[in-house]
Amino acid sequence: MNLETGRPDHIEDALVRMHTGQWFGWNNKEKIYANLIIHDDSKTKPTEEELNAKLAEIQNEFDGKETKRASAKQKLQDLGLTVDEIKEAFGI
């Protein structure tokens, strides 16, 4: 996840959305698909394509929420609220 924006940007973001708990790991190696290991025998290792599709899905969800947030902020400004008032009241 991008620490500045909160936008999902790594296959690990997709993995944590697929199942709960510590069901996967990286075997103390670089966090790339080739190093992905599954700790939970009841789970199967997703393909790299499945992970990329899941990542794209959650990125689209995030982007949609950001678009709605920006639209709401603009509507509040159009109604006469200042940026500081909006931020203080809604945290956006």
Image (cartoon, rainbow, N blue to C red):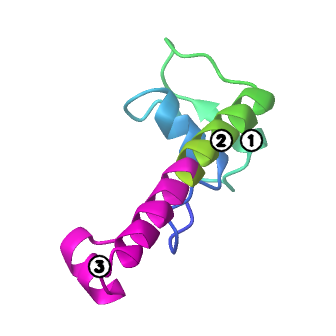
Q: Residue at x 71, y 43 (%)?
A: 35
Q: Quadrant of residue 78?
A: bottom left
Q: CA distance from mark 1 to mark 3?
A: 39 Å
Report the residue at 48% width, 35% height from top: 17
Mark 2 vs mark 1, foreground winner is 2
Q: Left of 86 or right of it: where is 78? A: right
Which amino acid, by three-letter code, is at mark 1?
A: Tyr
Query: Which secondary structure class fits the magenta region best?
Result: helix
Q: Which residue is mark 3?
A: 87
The earlier-in-sequence mark between 3 and 2 is: 2
Q: Magenta includes 65?
A: yes
The image quadrant that residue 72 belongs to is bottom left
Residue at the disc numbered 2: 55
Q: In the rendered image of this protein, does residue 28 appear above or below residue 56?
A: below
Q: Which region shows up in magenta? A: 64-92
Name the residue nearer the viewer: 16 or 41: 16
Name the secondary structure under disc 2: helix
